Image: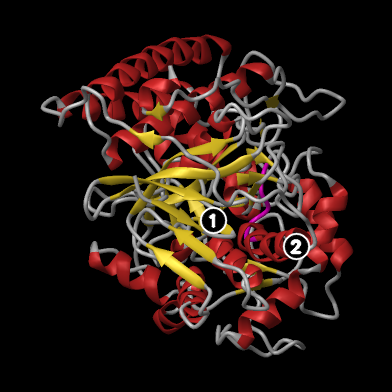
Amino acid sequence: MKTIDCDYLVVGSGIAGLMSAIHLAEGGTTRILIVTKAGVEDSNSSKAQGGIASVMEPTDSFDAHVADTLDAGAGLCDEATVRRIVEAGPARIAELERYGVAFDKGDSISGYDLGREGGHTARRILHSGDITGREVEARLVAHVRTLPNVTIMEHAHLIDLVTTRRLGIAGRNRCVGAYAFAEADSSIFAIRAPRTILATGGCGKVYLYTCNPDIATGDGIAIGWRAGADVANMEFIRFHPTCLFHPKAKSFLISEAVRGEGAELCDREGVPFMQKYDRRGSLAPRDIVARAIDTELKRTAAPYACLDIRHKSVEFLKRRFPNIYAKCLEFGIDMARDLIPVVPAAHYCCGGIKATVEGETSLDGLYAVGEVACTGLHGANRLASNSLLEALVCPCEMARKVRQEKVPSVAGLNIPDWVSGDAVASDEAVILAHNWTELRTCMWDYVGIVRSAKRLQRAYHRIRNIRSELRQYYFDYLVTPEVLEVRNLADVAELIVRSAHKRRESRGLHKTLDYPERLPVARDTILHGRVTRPYASTFSLKDEG
């Protein structure tokens, strides 16, 4: 089995992963390997339309941004974490501009065309048209490619982390690398690294309806938990209120920035309804808006709600939302003249691997940054456009921290060969496809926007059965990317259900019919990493038991 050595293994090539590599590469003496399961620019980050929240105006303040974040987080944010990340925003914006990111300019004091989104009390969203994520991703990729000590390995899927406990080494458990699968030749190889940084994004594909791309299968959360890292607050899944409703749209998001520019949520007759649910109307935080739409759809049996921005001119819409306007027009919807049909869809995981601002997890040698991490910034509900801010700030803080650390060497550490045993190529792909669909349908029906104890119990039993079926499938058939993704989705689904069951209240994104009130004291939901046993002389998925 081939084994690759590096100083830092970065998993994922979204904004958090690229920023990690950039800051770890400073000085040019360390070897950084970026492993990504698709192409380097294929990430959830590149789909981000809205922008980056950062205080840029003298009329705005860090205190106001912190207050808005704490309010959206429903009492569960860590205020010290929020303040650190918010106050680091302007420096990271300046860094992006040095890499060539072009934010839209306007007539504000700062010179930027700042947007406003739900939950914000000021205009503080920097954007590049309505393709901010794509612009930032492209510039960071271009910069990373100039760094001689950074290697990018595309179309390689992490299978599992390698830890000292699994190797039978005494002492405190530590991550020392990983097993991975290369699509190019279907080979399995090992990566030996004293530090591994997970920047794998979220898990939107665990739900039947999501605006996330197909790659968002919760890989980092599942892999980290299986290795022994604690996860936190997995019950807080944000459903974006406005995913385009069209049979051919395939999860296209209508950015919250559209509501920030005055779009109103209404029924199919054009009658607004958000004032019935919140005094802020269509600019209420996303959890409130998503539940309001869900309630209206259930009340009227309508298949979708609508966004109305017909008061804006074609010229304005083409300039401010060129990508959204063009995509809607592709499906026969003229935003300047027609109502835009929308439905809620799974969008963002506010929980994840429990981590500090510097990315430290409960497992030595393992770091988590970006959406895969739960740092205390988002609490029970993420404030709009704080996600890209976190993805910029935490990698910088992580790199600053780890460069000061002295870690045990892993040079020469023996990682057991991967042996497939009696596994054969699958001739039962229908089983995998069925489990994939059933898992996501189960999560949508029972663990969606509004939950109940009975629904969660049903989901738990079905997901346990699916995981059991998948385990047998792993034993019988050779590893494929599809096997790895469904396995990770099933693990994440169970973590979400278990976390939701533990929270006996309604708070932020977690709404349960059995416990409709909020408890007076906010506490994180912590699920400890799985206890693992040592490897045999060789390793395969069967060792996962």
Residue 543: x and y, percent?
42, 21
Instruction: In the rendered structure, find residue 163 and report the number of the disc placed on it.
Output: none
Q: Quadrant of residue 484?
A: top left
Judge depth for marks 1 and 2 and give the one in front.
Answer: 1
The verdict on residue 382 being magenta is yes
Residue 327: x and y, percent?
31, 67
- Residue 347 visible: no
- The type of residue carrying mark 1 is Leu
Name the residue rendered at 58%, 19% in the picture.
Answer: 498
Would you name the residue on which mark 2 appears?
397
Q: Count residues near mark 2 (Cα–Cα under 10 Å), then give few for <14, some for 14-19, many for 20+.
A: many
Q: Count residues near mark 1 (Cα–Cα under 10 Å), then give few for <14, some for 14-19, many for 20+.
A: many
Tag 1–tag 2 contact (CB < 8 Å): no
The boundaries of the magenta stretch are 381-385
- The type of residue carrying mark 2 is Glu
Name the residue rendered at 62%, 35% in the picture.
Answer: 236
Q: Quadrant of residue 521?
A: top right
Q: Is residue 48 above or below residue 119?
A: below
Would you name the residue on which mark 1 appears?
9
